[in-house]
Amino acid sequence: MQKKILIVVGSTGGHYFPGIALGEKIKQFQPDIEIFFSGEKKISGLEIWRKKHFKFLPVAVVKRPRRKIFFPFIMISTIYVLIKSITLLKRLNPDLIVCMGSYVTVFPALAGLLMGKKVILHEQNLLPGLANKILNRFNIPAAITFKETKKYLKNTIHTGLPLRKELQSTEKNFSKYDLSSERKTILILGGSQGAKFINHLVIDTVNHLDNKKYQFIHITGRQTYEEVKQFYQKHNICCFVKDFSYEMPELMNLADIAIARAGAGTMAELSFKGIPAVFIPYRFGGGHQKYNAEWATKYGCVIMEEQNAGTQMLINCIKLLEQDLSERKKLFQSASLADTDGKLAKLCLQLIERNGKNN
């Protein structure tokens, strides 16, 4: 009988890109296995599912009410979402459920446990999120990106973060993006959350840099794309600006340094490429990005907290990274956050071959 794996992901690229990388690696090792994805309905229409030929199944979620008057209805909502998750699992009947973090994963995992399914977690950040902390208390094993995470969870296996196969390309094509191989290239990544702050900080800083020396690859997010694009055009600055790009592996090949949020996915990809960064942690979401960024300072990167950020500080951070840049590149690359060998994929395949529950 054909084996099935359900990968449950959150609604940001930091959750679903590693999940996709995992799915592709599993298919590489065992082509006849069926891979399904599940998550919030709002990401069901993403082009990536069609591009990667994966079927996406929306799952119901429990969200915190905005008004206190609705709090008594949480229990009803919880029961409803659990029943919907059980219904989904009965229909699909997966041999393994992989939860990639986020509150979206909680009820599919609990439904899986109630039905005797095998479940495994993947924790991307150094400091675990609430969903994985809760689920790990049920003795669900957790694959981890950072070795240090074992202090916060039990029953852990260090695998690293699954890496998209496209990132293993090393081709450099500056002309494709109207860039020059003679200039230092700064890559700016706002991430799926909090891009607006970084965008404004960078455009406030760019005019204070030598624009004959530097050029910019700026991924803005949707909200401020037109504003940032018009700024670069107005000041005739050499750049490549997009709100979002599926060509990030190729663009990363061109970068010397980065200015970015400190999500684990971004950090693992930059580390794999050897691109030291000024990390500006997102202040919300449990503050896990600060722990990631502090860890990265041991590997040649710089942290700049949002509340202290400013034009001169960003300039100083860029100049600091440029000191011994080649050594910083090697050091950050040695951090080895990425799972390039398919450790997590192999672990998933081992689990579905075993008899019994999570053992």
Image: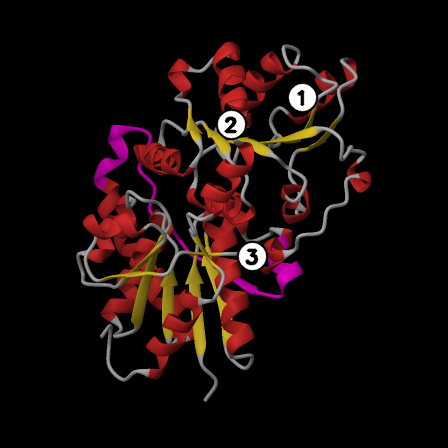
Task: Look at the image and say whether residue 52 sits in the magenta stretch.
Answer: yes
Q: The residue tagged with tag 1: helix, strand or loop? A: helix
The location of residue 323, given as percent across then percent down, is 52, 26
Asked whether, in this view, residue 190 is left or right of residue 334, the answer is right
Q: Considering depth in this image, is 58 or 138 the residue closer to the camera?
A: 138
Camera-near label (1 vs 2) is 2
Residue 71 quadrant: top left
Residue pictured at 30% horizontal, 28% vertical: 67
Q: Which residue is mark 2?
A: 321
Q: Amino acid at mark 3?
A: Arg
Q: Considering depth in this image, is 348 or 226 the residue closer to the camera?
A: 348
Camera-near label (2 vs 3) is 2
Q: Amino acid at mark 2?
A: Leu
* Highlighted magenta segment, given as a residue range: 48-72
Q: The residue tagged with tag 3: helix, strand or loop? A: loop
N-terminal of the pair, mark 2 or mark 3, is 3
N-terminal of the pair, mark 1 or mark 3, is 3
Which image quarter is the C terminus in?
bottom left
Asked whether, in this view, residue 312 is left or right of residue 237, the answer is left
Please tell me the numbered disc located at residue 164. Answer: 3
Q: The residue tagged with tag 2: helix, strand or loop? A: helix
Q: Which residue is mark 1?
A: 228
Residue pictured at 47% horizontal, 32% vertical: 261
